[in-house]
Amino acid sequence: MATIDYLPPLRHDGQETSDYTSFTVTPISGALGAELHGIDLVSRLDRQQLAELRRALLNHMVLVLRDQDLDAGELVALGRAFGPLHINPFVEGVAGHPEVMEVRSEENETARFAGRWHSDITWAERPSLASLLHARIVPPFGGDTLFANMVLAWDALSPVMRRMLDRLNAEHTAFQGHDREASLARAPETVSHPLVRTHPESGRKALFVNEYFTRAIEGMTSDESRPILDFLFRHLIRPEFTCRVRWQPNTLVIWDNRCTQHYATNDYPGTRRLMWRVTVEGDRPV
């Protein structure tokens, strides 16, 4: 794939449409997620195709594309079409491509990249815009990824709860997901983000807390903060807000970290799983 120019953010008018000329779309669930058919990401995409891909991401939040035989360079080029790429300070990238993070599970491992709902790198001052995850080796069973729609989770709260949360900020830290001493030199100890962020392209509000990286609500005691966060962590993963993606070799999934969370299932003991991920830098939540 040739180098793709970065496309500027879209200004979404809020009207979801199935009017795509570059591919067809099959929704995964009523909450979020869609499979795209008829698009080959190995070939050079023109600006119209990339714009439609961006529009589909805004409409569906999670895009699943099957049979995309991408190498590391092609994955990087595609990721850069969405914006500058983040280099993870905690994980070494694949050879020659520091932007590509390897998510690997071996047959004898029990501790894996799995088991907690989160949005990628909310511990950074500028959390991720989107992530692209490409399946290299998949287990014969299990290893699915679940996604949840944070716009629906926000909309489902009572008006009283929304008014309270809309004024609050929360502390996020990498230390809940990584060793503290090793993390100090690589990331700030804490960053502050609003509990509710406004999507910069769609204008929609979404909950922006997650159990992996969110530590506390600012200005509250632990006894006050903890019950609110625990309620939100339960609320935002209600089944009606979610979809489930089953992986196949060469499946690529693109998701919007500004309005979704995801959860990797650890239910494939004794088998291998290898994925490549690139993460697109975002802006500061407001």
Image (tube, helix red, strand yellow):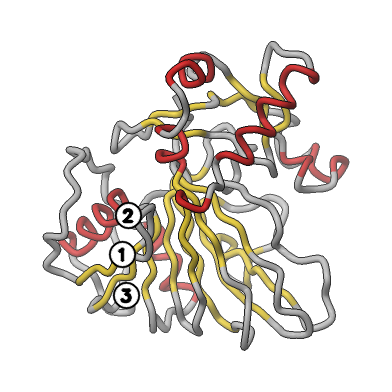
Quadrant of the snapshot with the N terminus: bottom left
Q: Amino acid at mark 2?
A: His
Q: What kind of element bears circle 3? A: loop
Q: Where residue 158 appears, x then y in whole percent?
A: 46, 24
Q: Is residue 57 left or right of residue 118?
A: left
Q: Residue at x 63, y 39 (%)?
A: 233
Displayed quadrant of residue 46 = bottom left
Residue 27: give its label. 1
The reply to whether callout 1 and callout 2 are in contact (CB within 8 Å) is yes
Residue 280 seen: no
Residue 15 seen: yes
- Judge whether 106 appears above or below 64 on screen: below
Is label 3 or label 1 in front? Answer: 1
Q: Where residue 137 appears, x then y in whole percent?
A: 60, 84
Of pointers 3 and 1, the one earlier in the residue sequence? 1
* Foreground residue among 46 and 174: 174
Within 10 Å of disc 3 (Cα), the crowding (few <14, some 14-19, many 20+) is some
Displayed quadrant of residue 111 = bottom right
Is label 1 or label 2 in front? Answer: 1
